Image (cartoon, rainbow, N blue to C red):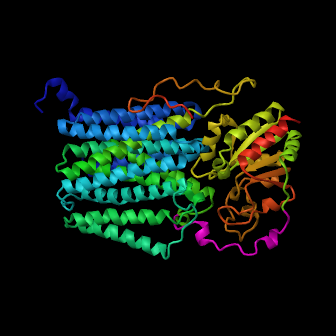
């Protein structure tokens, strides 16, 4: 505190806290600009600027001295050196796993900070429960988030099987692990100073994070990623309470709230409870559809790119229905080319985006934006559904369950009640598909047997390009 | 700080979060998620605060890792969000051209903790 006047003003805790107020105000302003694509770029920059202010203000802390600055510099430099190339090089199709990874390191940071604070307090968390309880919470939730996100990353990246992995008595094992973590936490909060117990908390939560995400299948990933995002936010807020830092509390809680909203919206879009998603995917719980084709039974008509081109050439409105298959085939640019060719012929093109199409909320929108599709052509489910009736051709590219009419019609279907895109109401339906394998949910899709439907088998990208070139030569 | 004050802040932040985020359209859900993801990189501050009073090699090591993780979260998160958002374009008014008109190019540099403006690959 004997620093020169100017320095001591900057290092005044009140000044630092004032900076935090500016920082979280900028977060809120930035996020509120995310409500429209026209202001969103600016909003993100505003939030990033707020983060810069928060970091600089924290570095003014008079308790920091030379040796710590060196360590901090190492952390900042290494983190930047890892973060920039990852962010710059990632393909848009790989965005879900990138977000999972960034989310995971955030959770990991929280868990590590909690561990270090535990050591700093000499393991005595019982003296001040207002610090102790948030620290234990941060340790448990941060660790779950770190490991859960890593598993989600592995699944999305294809390092681990994307389909649901059934763990015997998984629910009981998970409840047991949570009980171990919470029990160890209570022991520490009531007087134990054992570091082993604290590490047990981190480990039990780590195994729980792994086992909780492993059984969840790919199509449920939008829910999982949103949930983990909320978890990391909440754990950051808890760390903020433990460290008496308002910036952490506000920013962490806002993320916790937003992740919770998104999770809820995604679960609603699948007509499932968050609980049922987190208990394991369709493939794990729903009975396999036996003899399902006895009812749907019809024949599948396959078609050729040339025929599709002719069909489209006489259409007035074409609706593109993209799904995860479009991302896998990297077909978004080919789709855009097709749309341009159609628009050149004064055919109206719209895109029907189901909220859970893809592997994270809004995944399809990002891919199509990458291909320069104007966002005002991207229609949300409620806006496009009334349009299918006056749509001449709906072209379904790598989407399956989100178009399954059983969700509307067949009350014993596992997906009954899920809001879907009413593709079957259009005059003609073209389905681009690799093969007749059923969708993620393992459910037959009667759309494929509908008399208005024709299937175009093969890789989505080359199929779309073929249609475009056939159309061009008409 | 008083625990009750902190809980008050926590609750208010939750309400602000719910209010702001419920207005974001589906179209922007991925950038929203990655943007909020970057914001929870604020845990970086926790590492910076904790290292000021850390003693012992293990604690310092733990915190350097935490700071590294937090930095990856912040830098990567904001940068990738910027990259995504710069791709969202409105339909150009005159039907002739179809690229790079509707939206002004990203003029400002990304914030100082980020790198040169990321061009969509």
Please state the horizontal and vertical placement of residue A425, each as a whole percent of the image. Answer: 81, 53
In which quadrant is the N terminus of chain A drawn? top left
Whether residue A231 is visible here, answered yes or no, is yes
Q: Is A223 on the left or on the right of B100, as rendered?
A: left
Which is nearer the eye, A282 or A307? A307
Q: Is B113 on the left or on the right of A424, as rendered?
A: left
Please state the horizontal and vertical placement of residue B102, each as a whole percent of the image. Answer: 64, 26
Please state the horizontal and vertical placement of residue A11, each as a whole percent of the image. Answer: 21, 32
Count the labels in the image.
Answer: 0
Please state the horizontal and vertical placement of residue A338, each as a whole percent of the image. Answer: 76, 38
Q: Is A386 on the left or on the right of A225, as rendered?
A: right
Q: Which residues are magenta?
A: A278-299
Whether residue A290 appears in magenta in the rendering, the answer is yes
Whether residue A159 appears in magenta in the rendering, the answer is no
| Residue drawn where x is 38% and y is 68% of the image | A178
Q: From the viewer's perspective, is residue A3 above or below residue A358?
A: above
In which quadrant is the C terminus of chain A drawn? top right
Q: From the viewer's perspective, is residue B104 above or below residue B17?
A: above
| Residue drawn where x is 47% and y is 36% of the image | B79
Whether residue A63 is visible here, answered yes or no, is no
| Residue drawn where x is 86% and y is 35% of the image | A473
Most distant residue in the left direction: A2
| Residue drawn where x is 42% and y is 34% of the image | A48
Which is nearer the eye, B96 or B68? B68
């Amino acid at each position: 505190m004997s620093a020169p006047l100017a320095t001591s003003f900057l290092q005044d805790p009140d000044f630092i806290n004032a900076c935090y107020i500016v920082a979280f105000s900028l977060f809120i302003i930035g996020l509120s600009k995310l409500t429209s694509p026209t202001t969103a770029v600016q909003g993100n920059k505003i939030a990033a600027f707020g983060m810069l202010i928060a970091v600089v203000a924290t570095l003014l802390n008079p308790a920091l001295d030379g040796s710590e600055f060196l360590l901090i510099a190492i952390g900042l430099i290494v983190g930047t050196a890892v973060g920039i190339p990852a962010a710059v090089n990632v393909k848009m199709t790989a965005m879900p796993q990138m977000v999972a990874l960034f989310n995971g390191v955030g959770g990991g940071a929280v868990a590590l900070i909690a561990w270090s604070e535990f050591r700093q307090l000499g393991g005595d968390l019982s003296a001040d429960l207002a610090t102790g309880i948030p620290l234990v919470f941060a340790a448990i939730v941060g660790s779950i988030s770190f490991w859960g996100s890593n598993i989600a990353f592995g699944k999305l990246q294809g390092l681990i099987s994307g389909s649901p992995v059934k763990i015997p008595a998984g629910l009981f094992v998970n409840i047991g692990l949570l009980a171990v973590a919470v029990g160890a936490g209570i022991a520490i909060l009531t007087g134990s100073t054992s570091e082993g117990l604290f590490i047990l908390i981190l480990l039990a939560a780590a195994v729980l994070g792994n086992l909780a995400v492993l059984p969840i299948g790919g199509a449920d990933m939008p829910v999982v990623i949103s949930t983990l995002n909320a978890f990391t936010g909440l754990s950051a807020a808890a760390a903020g309470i433990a460290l008496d830092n308002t910036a952490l509390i506000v920013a962490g809680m806002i993320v916790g709230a937003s992740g919770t909203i998104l999770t809820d919206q995604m679960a609603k879009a699948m007509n499932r409870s968050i609980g049922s998603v987190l208990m394991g995917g369709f493939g794990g719980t729903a009975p396999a559809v036996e003899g399902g084709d006895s009812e749907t039974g019809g024949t599948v008509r396959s078609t050729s790119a040339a025929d599709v081109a002719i069909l489209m050439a006489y259409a007035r409105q074409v609706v593109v229905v993209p799904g995860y298959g479009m991302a896998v085939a990297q077909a978004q640019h080919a789709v855009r080319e097709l749309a341009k060719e159609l628009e050149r012929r004064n055919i109206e093109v719209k895109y029907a985006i189901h909220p859970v199409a893809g592997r994270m909320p809004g995944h399809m929108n990002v891919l199509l934006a990458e291909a320069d599709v104007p966002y005002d052509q991207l229609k949300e489910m409620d806006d496009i559904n009334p349009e299918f009736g006056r749509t001449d051709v709906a072209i379904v590219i790598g989407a399956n369950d989100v178009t399954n009419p059983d969700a509307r019609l067949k009350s014993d279907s596992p997906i009954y009640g899920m809001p879907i895109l009413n593709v079957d109401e259009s005059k003609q339906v073209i389905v681009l598909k690799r093969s007749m394998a059923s969708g993620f949910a393992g459910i037959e899709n009667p759309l494929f047997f509908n008399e208005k439907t024709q299937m175009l088998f093969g890789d989505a990208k080359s199929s779309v390009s073929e249609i475009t070139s056939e159309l061009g030569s008409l | 700080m008083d625990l009750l004050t902190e809980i008050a802040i926590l609750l208010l932040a939750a309400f602000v979060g719910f209010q702001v985020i419920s207005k974001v359209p589906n179209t922007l859900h991925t950038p929203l998620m990655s943007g909020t993801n970057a914001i929870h990189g604020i845990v970086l501050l926790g590492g910076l605060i904790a290292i000021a009073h850390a003693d012992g090699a293990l604690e310092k090591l733990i915190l350097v890792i935490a700071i590294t993780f937090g930095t990856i979260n912040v830098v990567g998160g904001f940068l990738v969000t910027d990259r995504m958002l710069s791709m969202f374009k409105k339909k150009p008014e005159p039907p002739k051209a179809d690229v790079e008109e509707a939206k002004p190019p990203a003029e400002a540099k990304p914030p100082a903790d980020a790198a040169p403006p990321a061009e969509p690959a």
